[in-house]
Image (spheres, grey):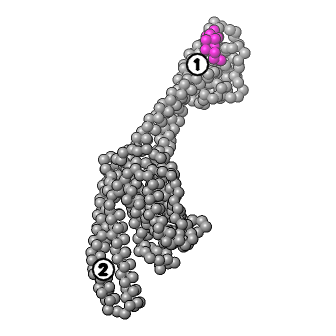
Amino acid sequence: MRTRLLPLLLVLMAGVLLALGFPLAASLAAARQQTVVVDRIDDTARFAALAQFVTERGTGIDERQSTLHGELVRYHEVYGIEVGVFYRDTTAMARAPKDWDVPQRGEPRRAFREALLGRRSHDPPQVWPWQRNARLAVASPVVRDGDVVAVVLTDSPTGQLRSRILHGWLLIAAGEVAAMLLAVGAAFRLTGWVLKPVKVLDAATHDIATGRLNSRVAAAGGPPELRRLAHSFNEMADNVEEVLEQQRAFVADASHQLRNPLAALLLRIELLALELPPGNDEIASVRTEGKRLAQVLDDLLDLALAEHAPADLRLTDIGELAGERVAAWRPLADEKGVRLTGHGSAVTAWADPVALSSALDAVIDNALKFTPAGEEVTVTVAADGDTSTIVVTDGGPGLTDDELTRVGDRFWRSNRHQNVKGSGLGLSISRALLTAGGGSITYSHHEPHGLRVTVSVPRSAPEGAPAGPRA
């Protein structure tokens, strides 16, 4: 979730910073240029004041015109700015350099025409740092007796102005980068503060989903809404655990309480059978159904205990354990004419040995039950990354894709196997036993036919367990 939330926050923050940065950069450039324009206006105003007292043209060069010319020459030499005082017809009164005239087009010409109307230049086009050949033209009118008789025109290079604007922009960019770094840090802190309770809640939900019903959320941080959610989640988990506990207790109590009346009923059936002719089909059928019901009650009690009892996890050599279970079931396999073989070396994992043995017994029993004579049941032990696996494959008829999605459900049995002895709870008990210890059981097709059952147990030590070597 952080990978989705962080880009959104960063894009929004970057948008805000850019929205502030561009106007600030434009304002800085305008301020820098306005400073230069004001300075040029002051200069042109001073030259215009000198030009007011120059004698009309056609009378020769007088002392005032010579003084004006000297001022313009020194100004050009010091600042490198082209400057001139021009009559209305663009004839030069004085200028520096001496060959400079009013351009026929461009910004200087526009400034000259504006000054002829009696207005000083006040808003020349903005100069940007990338305009290498840009010039800044400023003009002021020379007014005598209320009439504009001449114009003072300056045409300035913009190298220093562009450098100052660029320097100011670099400072703004540095500030934007620093602000963005702070925003990134703030975004990480904010998302961490917001998402930490979500992560804790997700972990608790996963624990409950995998069977650790005592997992709860400590509502100690995050927004108030998430703290309330954590509190509500804990209440929900308490209610779910209580309901499941009541359900387990009911199943266990019902199974236990029904065993005594059923045992008495079976005893009476046996007594009744003594009074009937030998080989009576009805009494044999009743006896069979009674024994099947007793087996279902025993399996229900085992299932309730498996779901309730905590796992006693320890570092276990599952290769040795699987070998023991194969040896225990081999006499029954030989009796049915099925080859039962085991493969694999010493592989360790964290498991409850009793629970894992019971789960393997249920899986191997199921495999032998559906494997015809002459076929093979194979038990293979291997290490697979963070888990160790025990794979049981058989040569039976197998299951269809639809049946694979239901195998392991309580009381479920394939329609094709209804006549096979069983209660439909064996694999459910195996799953409950394995889940309690952090393991799992999966089912798939075995080629060319049969069922492949994979029992997986973790190789990593659970929390609170002493660390041990890994095979």
Q: Which of the 4 image quadrants contains residue 261?
A: bottom left
> Quick one: label 1 or label 2, which is nearer the N terminus?
1
> Regarding mark 1 in the picture, which secondary structure is present there?
helix
Camera-nearest label, 1 or 2: 2
Rendered view: 429 above or below 171: below
> Regarding mark 2 in the picture, which secondary structure is present there?
helix
> Which span of residues is magenta-colored?
70-84
Rendered view: 90 above or below 8: above
Which residue is under mark 2? Answer: 262
Q: What's the amino acid at mark 2?
A: Leu
Q: In this view, does 290 lie to the left or right of 332?
A: left
Question: Which is nearer the eye, 257 or 32?
Answer: 257
Q: Do the residues labelled 1 and 2 touch (CB within 8 Å)?
A: no
Rendered view: 96 above or below 465: above
Which residue is under mark 1? Answer: 44
Q: Main secondary structure of the magenta part?
A: helix
Mark 1 and mark 2: Cα distance apart in space: 120 Å
Q: Residue furthest bottom?
A: 277
Q: Is residue 5 visible?
A: no
Mark 1, Cα crowd under 10 Å, few <14 / some 14-19 / many 20+, is many
Q: Is residue 216 magenta?
A: no
Residue 13: x percent and y percent? 47, 41
Q: How many badges with numbers are in the image?
A: 2
Residue 227: x percent and y percent? 32, 51
Question: Which is nearer the eye, 466 or 101?
Answer: 466
Q: Is residue 75 magenta?
A: yes
